[in-house]
Amino acid sequence: MDTMLDQPTTTSAPVSITEGAVDQLNQIREQENIPEDHFLRIGVKGGGCSGFTYVLGFDLAGEGDEHFTVNGIKVIMNKAHAIYLLGMQIDFVQGLDNRGFTFDNPNASSTCGCGTSFSA
């Protein structure tokens, strides 16, 4: 029995993922042949012009990770990151001037021009 996959998921995830972002994540998983045992890791790390940058990528679960299912995507997040990400929405935009994942974070007191770093 694989204990990583058998861990319970919570009833409410701290973040939301739009349908557009889900579609793009599923395309990336398929194109990059990401194994099924990998989760989508959402988190933060120090750096960037505003203090923190977002982490978004496929990864194996580790110690200290919480497990969620968000809009059909298996998500992991380090417990300590939830305070910075609670209520955040991840979207994917495809515009003339901008293409990529966007992060709408109500906890950010300021963000940089590129939208990938913030301060809390």
Image (tube, rainbow, N blue to C red):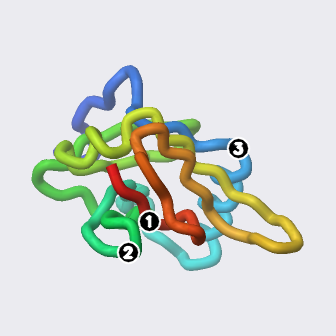
Q: Is residue 108 above or below residue 46?
A: above
Q: Is residue 51 above or below residue 73?
A: below
- Measured as percent of width and height from the top left, residue 100 is found at 67, 68
Residue at x 64%, y 76% (from the top left corner)? 31
Q: Amino acid at mark 1?
A: Ser
Where does label 2 land, which residue? 48
Earlier along the polypeptide chain: callout 3 or callout 2? 3
Where does label 3 land, which residue? 19
Which secondary structure lies at badge 3? helix
Task: Say if mark 3 contacts mark 2, CB within 8 Å.
Answer: no
Q: Amino acid at mark 2?
A: Gly
Residue at x 49%, y 44% (from the top left corner)? 105
Where does label 1 land, which residue? 117
Q: Between residue 54 and residue 110, name the one nearer to us.
A: 110
Q: Bin the neighbour count of mark 2 within 10 Å (Cα to Cα): few under 14, some 14-19, many 20 and up.
A: some
- Measured as percent of width and height from the top left, residue 70 is found at 50, 37
Q: CA distance from mark 3 to mark 2?
A: 27 Å
Q: Between residue 5 and residue 106, name the one nearer to us.
A: 106
Q: Quadrant of residue 42?
A: bottom left
Residue at x 88%, y 72% (from the top left corner)? 96
Residue extending farthest to the right is: 96
Q: CA distance from mark 3 to mark 1?
A: 23 Å
